[in-house]
Amino acid sequence: MSLSRTERGYGSRSSHRTRKSHPAATPVCKHCGAPSAAGEFCCAGCAYVYRLIHEQGLDSYYRIKDEVTNPADPSLLQPRDYGWLATAQAEAEKAAGERTPLLTLSIQGISCAACVWLVEKLFNKEPGAGRIEVNAQTGQLRLSWVRGVFEAAHFARTLQSFNYLIGPAGAAVPEASESRALAKRIGLCTAFAMNVMLFALPTYFGMERTFAYAPLFATLQLVFGTLSLLAGGGYFLKRALRALRERALHIDLPIGLGILGAYTGSFYGWMSGREEFVYFDFVSGFILLMLVGRWAQVVAVERNQRRLLRAQPTPPLVRVLAADGTVRDLAPESLASGDVFEVPMGQTVPVEARLENDEAALSLAWINGEAEPRVFHQRQRVPAGAQNVGRKEIRLVATQGWDRSLLAELLRPVERSDYRHRLLERVIQFYLIAIIGVALLAGVVWASRTGDALETGAIVTAILVVSCPCALGLAFPLADEIATVALRRRGVFVRAGDLWPRLQRVKKLVFDKTGTLTLETPALLNPEQVSNLDVRARAALRALVQDNPHPMSRALLEALLVRGAPEPLDGEPTEVVGQGLGLAGWTLGRAGWADNGLADGSTVLAEGGRVCARFRFADHARTDACVEVRALQSRGLIAFILSGDRREKVETLARELAIPSDHAYGELTPHAKAAWLDENGADDALMLGDGANDSLAFDRALCRGTPVVHRGMLEQKADFYYLGRGIAGIRALFEVNDARRQTQLVLLVFMIAYNLTAVGLAVSGLMSPLFAAVLMPLSSLATLAIVGIGMRAAWKTVAST
């Protein structure tokens, strides 16, 4: 790698195109287009991917990509086990027989058509590549290859370096998603509505009842109106009935009543030959509008859900050594107390165990949030969830079975019921009582005055039609969808459709520390030390840190790749646990271990004992954490830190972020975090965490968010996730919700005023069902205009945050 090509200005056209959509004072990342306070790139990951794309000759990506895409995730530089993929490839080849093997996988990180183009180009560069189909809507890819030449695991590692993760296809069937089912209903109902309108037009233009084809046209209106009811109206009617059986008032109930009332009145008018009461065109049009509104509500959330792997790779089998000397590969769930097993580099200890090696370096970050690895000695207890960050395989003796493992408890999924929008429920309840009461009362009065059942039915139907809940059924969901899409431009992805009403109740922000308020890896305080190394030293450093899960090695690899690095030296590094690594006369480790300098706490790269560079690290807060925490506190939110890391480190961070010392807690176990929420109120808390140690607290909290989407631990539990090196997305979430709430309040006011006027006219007999059917679409357009104007604030928030 060389800096010169990048310094000559790769991608200047795409950078200009991205920047012009933002204010001149707001710099944006040249790779992802997100606001960047750090210069040309928002993070080192984006800088690395940007370099890689140009060096591969794929810079056309920047000419076709969306203005804002996903920022690079730290996972692109982390070792990842793809043994499961090699097994899946072998199984696919065996199942294919003499045919071309095929494999379907999930892919994470696809954000636009340019991502699809890039993945296809990278696949075509692989030896033995066949065909590939990438489906951005479902988050899946299907590929074929030439046996004995193509390596799926190598392709997966290539994609990972470009910020795309590969996982198993998962059990979910894309065609079964609610948005796809709604899209099919919309297609059918659009065709039916167009046919109803076609056969209704002659009546509007004065066709006489004596016209030869008039009965046929009326019958065809009935047929296509009935088909609309069955294909689209049934969706709302079934959901309304299900809610009633559960003794709940759902938004689909008023929609279902409007559909059923309008269809019943039209059918009665058709049977009695009263054309003025036949308006199947309204029935079909109303159903279509309601389906579009529901689809808009569902599709944005599903799109965010599909951006993540639906299924993480299964944990690798554990090599268990039996007393008779035989070796068995067992699933972690099969481990029992007393089993002797081995854990390779980068893997996690599944159950509490006793170390058999002389010593080993293990990270407890996923369990207690402590960023710096610990050195464990022989016979010492190793907790479940510890990660082997050494380069050698370690041997342990299980002291418990999987069913008693803390890791098993933390990974266990917990079902949570949907949270209903209480304000919306109250509005629906009042709306139903008022409209049904008015319709029944009007029916009684008109029946006693006229004695004409058909005219009375027309009045009642007009009331149900003209009071259609367009604001509830169409505009409210559209506002939610616009808010969700706006947040995606800021790197925030809403996964739970019921997040918005829950977010309104949040009063406490509960942060984990390591990986949430700070970055996953320690910050390199003097990156110029990497830039000043000569080619030989950089080659040695790359060989020592690549494929190494140690957090300091990952930080150095990130700095090295961003600045350019030659191919690594040949050979396998040797490790002295707790001290450092060595290769061909080069060493990287604690100061004073293998160099002639002082033991000053730095990490030293040396050749033959001669110091070449001293690297200093610190566990710093994310770049914008101070500003953002203060901004969130100014909204009246109370910030807390719950961490498993050492108490003094937590208190130092709290002072830096201006969080009161009595709101910062350190050395907490996962159970202690959950207990704190139970004791201090979880029903108004937003929990923000990144590791398995936050899982139990996640299960308690009202709302949950995570900045980490590559571990397969919390992202499936989270209501939203946010990407990038900052936390500004959290404030954007609240501010976009403010714009959404304000818009919906205006919609409620409009709906009340409209219904008072329109229902009043209908009750007095001044509004025919036909006029009501015309007025309804106009009110729908008005509500959509309110949403469009009101949600402009959400886009302004995203642009300025």
Image (cartoon, helix red, strand yellow):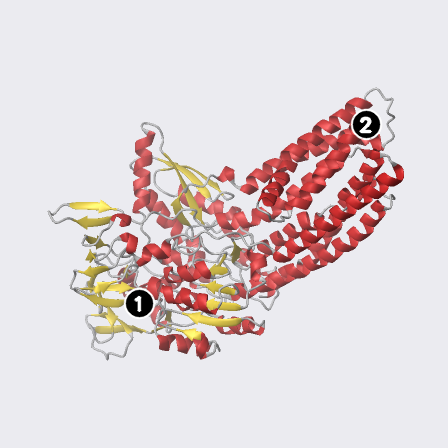
Tell me which numbered mark, 2 or 1, is placed earlier along the sequence: 2
Dot 1 crowding, Cα within 10 Å, few <14, some 14–19, many 20+: few
Front residue of 658 and 761: 761
Judge from the rendering whether residue 775 lies leftward or rightward of residue 748; answer left or right.
right
Numbered circle sitting on residue 102: none
Q: Quadrant of residue 198?
A: top right
The amino acid beneath tag 1 is Asp
Dot 2 crowding, Cα within 10 Å, few <14, some 14–19, many 20+: few
Front residue of 641 and 58: 641
Reading the image, the residue beneath label 1 is: 534
Front residue of 780 and 685: 685
Q: Quadrant of residue 407?
A: bottom left
Q: Residue furthest left?
A: 324
Identify which residue is drawn at 84% across, 46% down: 763
Judge from the rendering whether residue 111 lies leftward or rightward of residue 432; answer left or right.
left
Count of marks, rendered view:
2
Image spot of residue 286 (x, y percent) = 71, 40
Residue 42 visible? The answer is no
Identify which residue is drawn at 51% across, 48% down: 114
Asked if 465 appears above or below 597 in the picture, the reply is above
Residue 671 visible? The answer is yes
Q: Quadrant of the N terminus?
A: bottom left
Reading the image, the residue beneath label 2 is: 272
**Marks 2 and 1 close (CB-CB < 8 Å):** no
Q: Quadrant of residue 452?
A: top right
Q: Secondary structure at mark 1?
A: loop
Tell me the distance, in whole angstroms, between the alpha carbons under discs 2 and 1. 93 Å
Q: Secondary structure at mark 2?
A: helix
Image spot of residue 527 (x, y percent) = 37, 71
The amino acid beneath tag 2 is Ser
